[in-house]
Image: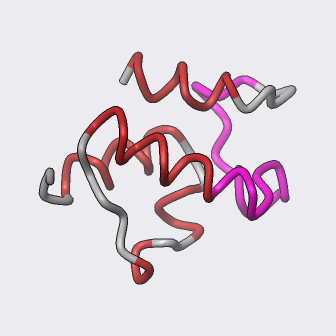
Amino acid sequence: MDKLLEILRSLNLDIDVETETGLIDKGILDSFDVVTLVAEIDRVFGVAVPPEELTAENFNSAQGLEALIRRLPSN
């Protein structure tokens, strides 16, 4: 989870990425941020995020992203 939190913090979000649960719903992440996250998840964790997984549920929080990374197969 530490690597994921580092990635989220690198987006320079002015929020507590560990506790925020509305990254998408509140408009904290924009489409560019999501593209950056997907690329970094692939690079750091070796996990390709398919288009059907680009949902608010998966991207609203660090916990949702962590669950997504754990659920998807690595490259």
Percent of width and height locating residue 6: 54, 19
Residue at x-position 28% and y-position 37%: 45
Please tell me which residue lies in front, 45 or 26.
Answer: 45
Magenta part of the chain? 16-34
Residue at x-position 74% and y-position 64%: 31
Q: Is residue 73 left or right of residue 23?
A: left
Residue 66 position by quadrant = top left
Q: In this view, does 62 lie to the left or right of 16?
A: left
Residue 25 drawn above or below residue 65: below
Percent of width and height locating residue 7: 55, 28
Please tell me which residue lies in front, 50 or 5.
Answer: 50
Number of marks drawn? 0
Percent of width and height locating residue 52: 41, 83
Q: Tell me the quarter of the image containing the N terminus.
A: top left
Please tell me which residue lies in front, 62 or 31.
Answer: 31
Q: Is residue 12 left or right of residue 60?
A: right
Percent of width and height locating residue 40: 47, 40
Residue 3 position by quadrant = top left
What secondary structure predominates along the stretch shown in magenta? Answer: loop
Residue at x-position 19% and y-position 57%: 71
Residue at x-position 61% and y-position 58%: 35
Residue 38 drawn above or below residue 10: below
Residue 33 drawn above or below residue 17: below
Q: In this view, does 43 lie to the left or right of 56?
A: left
Q: Does the magenta stretch include residue 20?
A: yes
> Colour scheme of this structure image?
secondary structure
Please tell me which residue lies in front, 3 or 40.
Answer: 40
Residue 6 drawn above or below residue 28: above
Q: Which residue lies furthest to the bottom in this view?
A: 52
